[in-house]
Amino acid sequence: MRAPRFSRLFAQLALLNQHQRHAVLAALHPAAGLDRIVFLVDEIRSRTRRCPRCACEQCYRHGYANDLQRFRCCSCGRTFNDLTGTPLARLRLKGKWLDYLGALLDSQPVRTAAKRVGVHRNTAFRWRHRFLERVKHDRPAQLTGIVEADELFLLESQKGSRKLDRKARKRGGRASRRGISRELDCILVARDRSGATIDAVTGRGALKSAQLTKHLLPKLAPQALLVTDANAAYQTFARTHRIAHQSVNLSAGERVRSSLEGAIHVQNVNAYHSRFRAWLARFHGVASNRLPNYLGWRWALDGGRVTSVEQLLRIAFGVINR
Ligand SMILES: [Zn+2]
């Protein structure tokens, strides 16, 4: 639209009644969301932009497609945009992404989020896992000082799978055997006293010391003091790797013991378990293979660590949030 015509149109905005103003705002909202996303994506990627094929940092602008600037690599000639090679590549309706990230920040179930953003529920589900793909990797590099570790068990779920590798359960919810069995997914959570938390889905059934070696060892600072319950897997693990270790015998009624290093208990990690379980309940069961995404999502929100859609978008791009 040419400038004089736009000025006339703009002057008329003052004449709108409330209903009309809202209609105009609603019509412009996706465009405003799109402009903001395009700006943010450029801001996030400009410092780390490189060719997805050869990692060359030299590129030049090469037109626009799907609302995004395209680039051409100076060395191999490949064209790409700022989403190429990220989990967000080829996702449509960019104007609605920020609203969707708002729904993620508010922990909204798929249908609620779909309604809020104005997309189909299948889209909302697909977006959830694309946006969370890198969020789950945004973890502290190390746990230091007193590190509490404990496992949490959830009923294994093949929600959404076309083929089950076991008989279907009637009405969802219960294991057929008591205690820890192969029907349960084991989730290891370790948390230090500064609140830094890591977790790992170690698979079905009881925790083994080899899994601790795989998931916990790389994250433990050399001087860390590991505090756990009396599960023998932790003892074997600590002994094998010569890690300082204290255990509390919960089954004997012991809760807290004091030591030179500080109070010995696993109450912080258990409180984290409770918050995770309570938060997860709103989704009415999640598929086992998606659990890492939910754990990452929960960690992003826990204690108000991530509070803005911009911050969440940054993490969705794999820009580490420190
Ligand atoms: Zn290249």
Image (tube, rainbow, N blue to C red):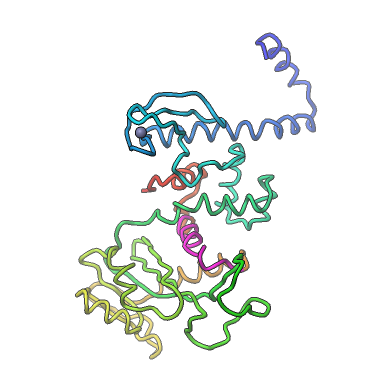
| Residue drawn where x is 59% and y is 73% of the image | 164
- Tell me if 99 is positioned left or right of 313 in this view: right
Q: Quadrant of the N terminus?
A: top right
Asked whether 226 or 53 is in front, the reply is 53
In the rendering, at what x and y percent does residue 168 appear? 63, 78
- Tell me if 176 is positioned left or right of 147 in this view: right
Q: Quadrant of ligand 1?
A: top left
Asked whether 84 or 174 is in front, the reply is 84
Query: Which image quarter: residue 25?
Result: top right
Residue lying at the far bottom of the rendered structure = 252
Query: Which image quarter: residue 282?
Result: bottom right
Dominant SS of magenta comes to helix
Q: Which residues are magenta?
A: 285-300
| Residue drawn where x is 56% and y is 47% of the image | 101
Query: Which image quarter: residue 211?
Result: bottom left
In the rendering, at what x and y percent does residue 142 appear? 29, 60
| Residue drawn where x is 41% and y is 32% of the image | 78
Asked whether 110 or 211 is in front, the reply is 211
In the rendering, at what x and y percent does residue 77 appear? 38, 29
- Tell me if 90 is positioned left or right of 231 in this view: right
Instruction: Using the image, determine if residue 15 lies above or below residue 5.
Output: below
Residue lying at the far top of the rendered structure = 4
| Residue drawn where x is 38% and y is 78% of the image | 207
